[in-house]
Amino acid sequence: MNYSESQLKAVKEFLYKIADDQLIIGHRNSEWTGLGPLVEEDIAFSSIAQDKIGQAQHIYEILHTLGEADADTIAFTRNAADFKSCHLVEYPIGEYDFSLMRNFLFNHAEQIRFDMLANSGLEPLARLAKKYRGEVKYHTMHANTWVKQLGRANEESHARMQSALNETFNLALGIFEESEFADTLNELNIFPGEKVLQYKWIEVITPLLEQSALVLPEPSAWQPVYGGRKGYHTEYLEPMLEEMGEVFRLDPKAEW
Amino acid sequence: MRFSTLIKTTKEDILEALQDVKDPEIPTISVVDLGIITGVEVDDDNFVKVTMTPTFSGCPALKIMEKMVKERIELLNINGVEVTTNFDTPWNTNMITPKGIEGLKKHGLAPPEKHNGLVQIEILEKVKCPHCGSRNTTLKTPFGPTLCRSMHYCNECLNAFEQFKPVD
């Protein structure tokens, strides 16, 4: 890969954004370990966490080949302002309905993103995307199953799922905050843009939500929560990073 | 010239030796039969290069398996060995050999069904029970005790079982 300085900046920002989302939501999913409402859900959230953190690690490894620090240093020593993750992934796990709906919205966006990236001009990423989309399929399957069941189970579960959707939807639109380098990524045939992804995402989730008796907010009410991609975060990220990196920072040179 | 360079170790020798290295989570299948050894080269100086690829990106057993592969090859008549992991040949469940499928069954797991490059998630719904062979089964959850397994229930023989789940 021979990129100019500005192209390299665009590529790195793009990789950071994808991997940071995965690391943060992966960590949040891991917080369900031992707390799941059923033992199967405990295992599901823990397994999804393991997948996402593993996937983030391999993307950080690409960044390392592009001159960034090694994966552990990237994951555990940066300040909140250096993270490019969207706000959706940062929020505390809340109740199960919130975490489940967050996973539903996030996993579908991720599934489509990796489908698009499987033919990306950024070859190391395309190789990973081909692999990841098969894994994420199980994440979307898990979310679809539960959203559908709870959306239609009884009055309380339906009300809770609808309110979780209302709560998470604008945050989820923040996934698609466009990069200032979008044109460069498009020219390099790396990624056609967040708006394309958002359009496809709406197409995929709309019928699934309908089958779950849930109603997507009216487009006039859509208020995407942006900022994460530019390093502006909620109050929840910093304490999470503190906790996540606590052991690593005790002895950064330790061999594991 | 050192003795070890006189008799050349072949790719076949390496693959045979690696039959001894089992998946730490499923001791009835070797890394070769699991399909995760994606390249073996032996150069003129008897230096061995092995390439591996993970089953799942987040597989925690990968580093251990790399080490086990390296240590097993070091027992052979060679001058050195390097084991690397990459995604150049991404793993999928079709890469499990027929012997590997038998190994999975021996461990009590339902093997993944062959796919044509694209796993339809519906095929998890009617997995063949490894105990009685019935397809009257129910998927309980796509996540099991390890990343590569799903959990099912057989409505015929009333046993719970695990499947090594198909991945494309």
Image (cartoon, rainbow, N blue to C red):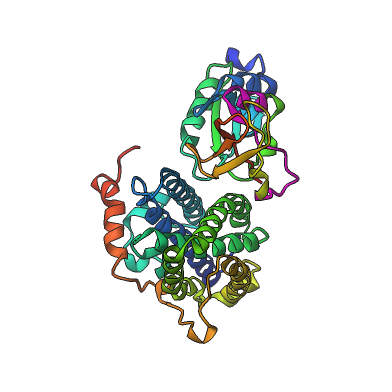
Q: Position of residue A139 (x, y in %)?
A: 53, 53
Q: Position of residue A47 (x, y in %)?
A: 46, 46
| Front residue (pair A8, A116) | A116
Queried whether the magenta region covers residue A124, the answer comes back as no
Q: Where is residue B94 in the image (x, y as percent from the top left)?
A: 70, 38
Query: Residue pushed farthest top?
Result: B3
Residue B8 is drawn in which quadrant? top right
Is residue A74 among the parts visible in the rendering? no
- Please report the residue visible at 33 percent of the width from the left and 62 percent of the height from the top: A92
Query: Residue pushed farthest left?
Result: A250
Residue A211 is drawn in which quadrant? bottom right
| Front residue (pair A71, A84) | A84
Queried whether the magenta region covers residue B110, the answer comes back as yes
Is residue A97 among the parts visible in the rendering? yes
Query: Residue pushed farthest right?
Result: B116
- Please report the residue visible at 52 percent of the width from the left and 73 percent of the height from the top: A176
Going by the image, does A198 lie left or right of A248? Answer: right
Residue B22 is drawn in which quadrant? top right
Q: Where is residue A232 in the image (x, y as percent from the top left)?
A: 36, 74
Please state the extent of the stretch shown in magenta in the rendering. B100-121
| Front residue (pair A96, B118) | A96
Is the N terminus of chain B in the top left, top right, bottom left or bottom right quadrant?
Answer: top right
| Front residue (pair A218, A69) | A218
